Image: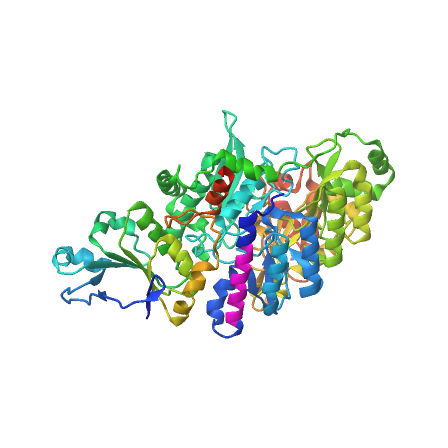
């Protein structure tokens, strides 16, 4: 599955840690692996990523988040939207600044919502999402909701216009 | 009325263009129906039994005559010459072609309308009191806040894939005409002891398979916090609402399962984190939106108009229509006119293109250019001078719109039922038609008085049968249509869920059963008692006795 970052397909330097394998290089671990073996994982020579299922809230390990350079949030179905809230909490409340990766059923028509919630890399289902990236980012430019993405909302632009 | 500024106009145009691309990808086979489904649903496009159905949003039920004319021309050009007004103040077209839908949406954008979020598991079109801005009992016009919520909820990046659909209703008056206790979130404008205006916040109401009366989780929310509080509720629901079972995914189940107190604590905790932030509503922003809803320049008139009174005295038909279809207005010499879309023997809520044009013309000339759609599937001319009522009535009557039955037994709500819907177990519209034929004597209808009958063709309850004074639910029994009857429901400030009376009736027998219930009520009612008053006093027994005695 292609990995998209900033609209480009990039090589993935990360690998998922297989069960009972020794961590080597940049590894992504499950919540269960992290909870079972955090000392070994912290000591290994490489970066550490965490993959959360859609019923695993990052709020539950808020104190550990600083240990990770990457957090991957799962969309088991595109209609399971829990990770949109998790992403905003990670960025806007817990101050997570590492890579926030969308994984699972990640489709072209959800990419912009994900970007607005704070995701910055996307393990997309197929090439349609790669080809559609530019259009997906630009097709709707009027935004009504303030999120942590720094984009200007219609509300802010109206106020700006009023103050000019 | 609200008018789009450059941002709103650009937004809707961009959204149409985006959907045009999605339709093209679907028609070219790049998107499967499975992948297309959530995209079309976010634009109000359903695949029904016979064809696509397009649901167009009428935000908080308010239309200008120009918008109504556009709805008429769409009905004529892209459908079979009519449209269907719904219980959520929207309009549905039952026969559009998929390839035409982007053009329809472009035409809607010309008059500042759209179909965004009229379906799908997102925040739906916000509904409001249909007499907003005209009602004498109003604290503030709820449409100001409905418009603010409309903007905030439009393509909300965090809340477009909720566990289930999410409906918000708002009323500005203590007499609840928006059914706020039967919505995912209900907002009731309140004044606190200091005289400030804010909202009572009610959560977790709903109909469907599990009817629940909503719970108040905050008695008074200052206006400036409206959006941050809504965002807090939605964020809790998006994370914790059930996603394993479609039928347990609405917020009402979450509130029940966590307990109202715990749910409230979760919301308040979340809100503490985000209040006074970017979602804060400054007074200037509220004033900016409020200016759009400034009342029309009403003329200074006498409350008593002799010409109107004389006509009412002389013309019994006119007097009857005034009694059922005309409501008090806040300005002296004015009235609100409800136009019944329930003529005898027709499908509730349907209007032809010609009828829409008649209503548009009347609104432009005689109702300050405003029209409303009610959640009871009627239309309203909110600002008519008493002296113009006779002309309005004559024109309506000449076009099949003069039925004097608003609030009466034949003013029924019915879902599309088995005739149109994939989910239905039984027909609804033909039952409504047969009931209205049975009670075709208008004199008798007026004698019976205020009585709400609501019919759903399956347990999803789109016909709101739970809150009918008399509710009718279509069920399937071994391949045959049967109808279960409930009594005592109410959607207003006396919110109640109707109780099942007894065994269900066949399609042939259900109309007799309704007549028996109405007759029992007429025999038993005391002075000034409405149906639910009598029912509360005597209970179900006398109704049952009469109904089931023969069996």
Name the colouring of the figure: rainbow
Farthest residue, direction front: A164
Residue B17 forms part of the magenta stretch: yes
Residue span colored magenta: B12-26
Q: Is residue B114 left or right of residue B264?
A: right
Write the residue at 48% across / 40% down: A159
Residue B281 in sight: yes
Residue B316 forms part of the magenta stretch: no
Quadrant placement of the N terminus of chain B: top right
Q: Is residue B477 left or right of residue B453?
A: left
Magenta-highlighted stretch: main secondary structure? helix
Residue B146's place in the image compared with A52, above or below, is: above
Residue A20's place in the image compared with B325, above or below, is: below
Write the residue at 51% across / 71% down: B26
Quadrant placement of the C terminus of chain B: bottom right
Q: Position of residue B456 (x, y in %)?
A: 60, 56
Q: Is residue B338 left or right of residue B114?
A: right
Q: Position of residue B471 (x, y in %)?
A: 61, 51
């Amino acid at each position: 599955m292609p990995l998209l970052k900033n609209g480009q397909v990039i090589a993935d330097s990360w690998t998922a840690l297989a069960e009972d394998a020794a961590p080597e290089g940049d590894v992504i671990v499950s919540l269960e692996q992290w909870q079972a073996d955090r000392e070994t994982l912290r000591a290994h020579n490489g970066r550490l990523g965490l993959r959360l299922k859609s019923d695993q809230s990052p709020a539950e390990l808020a104190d550990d988040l600083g240990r990770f350079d990457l957090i991957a949030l799962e969309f088991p179905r595109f209609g399971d939207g829990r990770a949109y809230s998790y992403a905003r909490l990670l960025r806007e409340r817990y101050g997570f600044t590492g890579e926030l990766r969308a994984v699972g059923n990640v489709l072209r028509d959800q990419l912009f919502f994900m970007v607005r919630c704070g995701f910055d890399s996307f393990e997309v289902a197929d090439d349609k999402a790669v080809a559609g990236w530019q259009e997906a980012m630009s097709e709707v430019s009027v935004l009504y909701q303030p999120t942590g993405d720094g984009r200007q909302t219609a509300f802010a632009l109206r106020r700006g216009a009023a103050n000019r | 009325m609200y008018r789009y500024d450059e941002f709103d106009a650009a937004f809707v145009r961009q959204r149409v263009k985006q959907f045009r691309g999605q339709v093209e990808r679907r028609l070219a086979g790049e998107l499967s129906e499975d992948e297309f489904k959530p995209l079309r649903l976010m634009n109000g496009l359903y695949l029904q039994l016979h064809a696509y159905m397009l649901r167009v949003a009428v935000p908080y039920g308010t239309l200008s005559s120009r918008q109504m004319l556009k709805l008429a021309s769409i009905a004529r050009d892209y459908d079979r010459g009519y449209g269907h007004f719904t219980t959520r103040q929207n309009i549905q077209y039952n026969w559009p072609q998929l390839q035409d839908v982007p053009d329809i949406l472009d035409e809607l954008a010309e008059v500042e309308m759209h179909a965004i979020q009229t379906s799908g598991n997102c925040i739906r079109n916000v509904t409001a009191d249909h007499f907003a801005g005209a009602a004498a009992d109003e604290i503030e016009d709820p449409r100001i806040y409905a418009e603010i919520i409309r903007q905030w909820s439009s393509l909300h990046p965090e809340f477009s894939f909720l566990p289930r659909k999410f409906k918000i209703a708002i009323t500005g008056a203590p007499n609840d005409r928006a059914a706020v206790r039967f919505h995912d979130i209900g907002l009731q404008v309140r004044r606190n002891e200091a005289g400030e205006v804010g909202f009572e916040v009610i959560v977790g109401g709903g109909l469907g398979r599990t009817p629940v009366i909503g719970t108040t989780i905050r008695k008074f929310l200052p206006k400036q916090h409206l959006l941050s509080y809504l965002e807090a509720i939605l964020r809790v629901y998006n994370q914790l609402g059930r996603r394993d079972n479609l039928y347990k995914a609405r917020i009402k189940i979450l509130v029940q399962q966590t307990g109202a107190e715990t749910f409230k604590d979760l919301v308040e905790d979340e809100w503490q984190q985000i209040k006074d932030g970017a979602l804060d509503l400054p007074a200037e922003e509220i004033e900016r939106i409020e200016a759009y809803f400034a009342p029309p320049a009403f003329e200074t008139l006498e409350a008593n108009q002799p010409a109107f009174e004389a006509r009412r005295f002389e013309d019994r038909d006119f007097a009857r229509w005034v009694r059922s279809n005309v409501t008090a207005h806040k300005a002296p010499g004015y009235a609100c006119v409800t136009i019944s879309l329930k003529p005898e023997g027709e499908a509730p809520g349907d209007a032809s293109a010609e009828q829409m044009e008649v209503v548009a013309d009347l609104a432009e000339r005689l109702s300050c250019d405003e029209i409303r759609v009610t959640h009871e599937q009627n239309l309203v001319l909110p600002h008519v001078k008493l002296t113009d009522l006779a002309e309005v009535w004559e024109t309506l009557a000449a076009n099949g719109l003069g039925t004097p039955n608003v609030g009466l037994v034949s003013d029924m709500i019915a879902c599309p039922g088995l005739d149109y819907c994939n989910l239905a177990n039984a027909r609804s519209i033909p039952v409504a038609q047969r009931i209205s034929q049975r009670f075709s004597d208008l004199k008798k209808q007026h004698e019976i008085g205020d009585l709400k009958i609501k019919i759903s063709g399956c347990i999803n309850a789109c016909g709101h049968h739970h809150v009918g004074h008399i509710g009718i639910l279509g069920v399937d029994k071994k391949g045959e249509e049967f109808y279960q009857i409930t009594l005592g429901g109410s959607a207003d400030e006396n919110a109640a869920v109707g109780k099942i009376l007894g065994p269900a009736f066949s399609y042939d027998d259900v109309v007799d059963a309704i007549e028996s219930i109405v007759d029992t009520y007429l025999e038993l009612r005391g002075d000034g008692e409405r149906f639910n008053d009598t029912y509360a006093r005597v209970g179900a027994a006398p109704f049952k006795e009469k109904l089931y005695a023969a069996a």
